[in-house]
Image: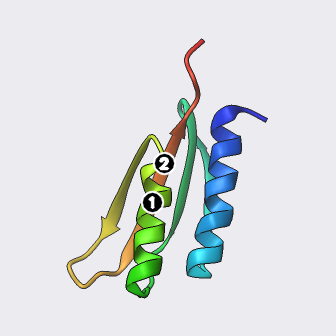
Amino acid sequence: MTDALSRAWDAAAQFVALTGEQVRVSQVAGGVQLSFRVVPLADDLHLEVLRVLDESDHYGHDGSSDGTGELWATYRESCP
């Protein structure tokens, strides 16, 4: 298992535990991307989701001003 895939699976498990949402894992150029639906969370869980996102190489939110949408995180392969 590659470093990016290992990190992504670890994060996916944490996101599922925190949000109860299904997490999609996709191969992308140079790494692995996770995405999952935004759901309302208590403040402490919200902070934990942000902590896990911060461990990724790149993350963001695709959504609208009403708070719906998806969060995503990318984990890049290490350069040799």
Residue under label 1, please give it: 51
Residue 55 circle label: 2
Relative horizontal placement of residue 43, taking residue 48 as reference (left or right): left
Asked if residue 36 is positioned above or below residue 2 in the image, the reply reads below
Residue 26 visible within the image? yes
Residue located farthest toward the top when viewing the structure as drawn: 80
Q: Looking at the picture, tell me which residue is in the foreground, 7 or 38.
A: 7
Distance, label 2 to label 1, CA atoms, is: 7 Å
Residue 52 at x, y percent in the picture: 50, 58
**Which amino acid is tagged 1?**
Arg
Per the image, label 2 sits on a secondary structure element best described as loop
Q: Is residue 26 above or below residue 61?
A: above
Residue 42 location (% of width, % of height): 42, 88
Name the residue located 43 percent from the left edge and 80 percent from the top edge: 44
**Decide: marks 2, 1 in contact (CB < 8 A)?**
yes
Residue type (three-letter) at the residue carrying disc 2: Glu
Element carrying mark 1: helix
Extreme residue toward the front, this view: 44
